[in-house]
Image (cartoon, helix red, strand yellow):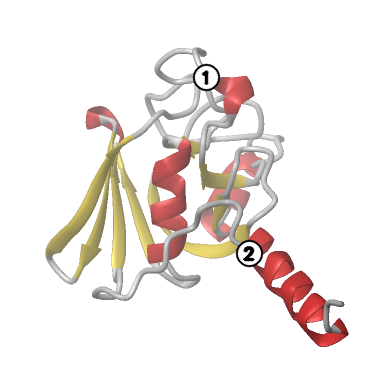
Amino acid sequence: MIDRRVLIQGGLLLGLAGCGGRGIPVYDGPQVTRVVVLKNRRRMYLLHDQTVLKSFDIALGFAPVGHKQFEGDGKTPEGRYYIDRRNPRSSFHLSLGISYPNEDDVARAFASGKNPGGDIFIHGRARKNRGKGRDWTAGCISVKDGEIETIYAMVRDGTVIDILP
């Protein structure tokens, strides 16, 4: 006869194992102090001070040239922002929120009579978005699903992200 405590402990262990089902690695290296995105090179760099820890190929908004002006323009913002939230249940596998729009972005959009938009993220591709081409997002920064797992583990909320033309 199986001991009831053993059965309960086994169930708890299986439940905890299910929590790691996304394959998010544990990161215990140097702190990522800054994320730099070079839109023209389609590259993103995770830095500790001036040292590049990791780099990734990226996809951008479907209209990649220029700074995001308003909701629906298909552009990826340019400027200094911050990682301000994370979504472990993203429809794009995992995602890290970017603090767009800032006060200047809001003022610029409203001066044009438009909404600045929002919900700009670094995210994975997820199966349904594979094969869409080089730049396909609505203004976000996309990487491969395995790469967003690494980025998600390495980058903390509050980290600076500089998105450069």
* Amino acid type of the residue tagged 2 in the rendering: Ala
Residue 86 marker = none
Q: Callout 2 environment at 10 Å: few (<14), some (14 to 19), or many (20+)? A: few
Q: Which of the 4 image quarters holds residue 116?
A: top right
Measure the alpha-carbon separation of dots 1 and 2: 28 Å
Classify 10 Å Cα crowding around label 1: few (below 14), some (14-19), many (20 and above): few
Q: Is residue 19 above or below residue 60?
A: below
Q: Position of residue 118 (x, y in %)?
A: 65, 46
Q: In what quadrant of the picture does the C terminus appear?
A: top left
Residue 75 is situated, as x and y percent measured from the top left of the image, at 49, 29
Occupied quadrant, residue 4: bottom right
Residue 143 as seen in the image, left or right of residue 115: left
Please state which of residues 65 and 21 is positioned toward the viewer in this rendering. 21
Q: Nearer the viewer, mark 1 or mark 2?
A: 2
| Residue on which disc 1 sits | 130
**Residue placed at 58% from the left, 48% from the top?**
94
Q: Give the position of the N terminus as an image quadrant.
A: bottom right
Residue 156 is at least partly visible in this image? yes
Q: Is residue 80 above or below residue 93?
A: below
Q: Secondary structure at mark 2?
A: helix
- Dot 2 corresponds to which residue? 17
Question: Which one is in front, 1 or 55?
Answer: 1
Residue type at mark 1: give it: Arg
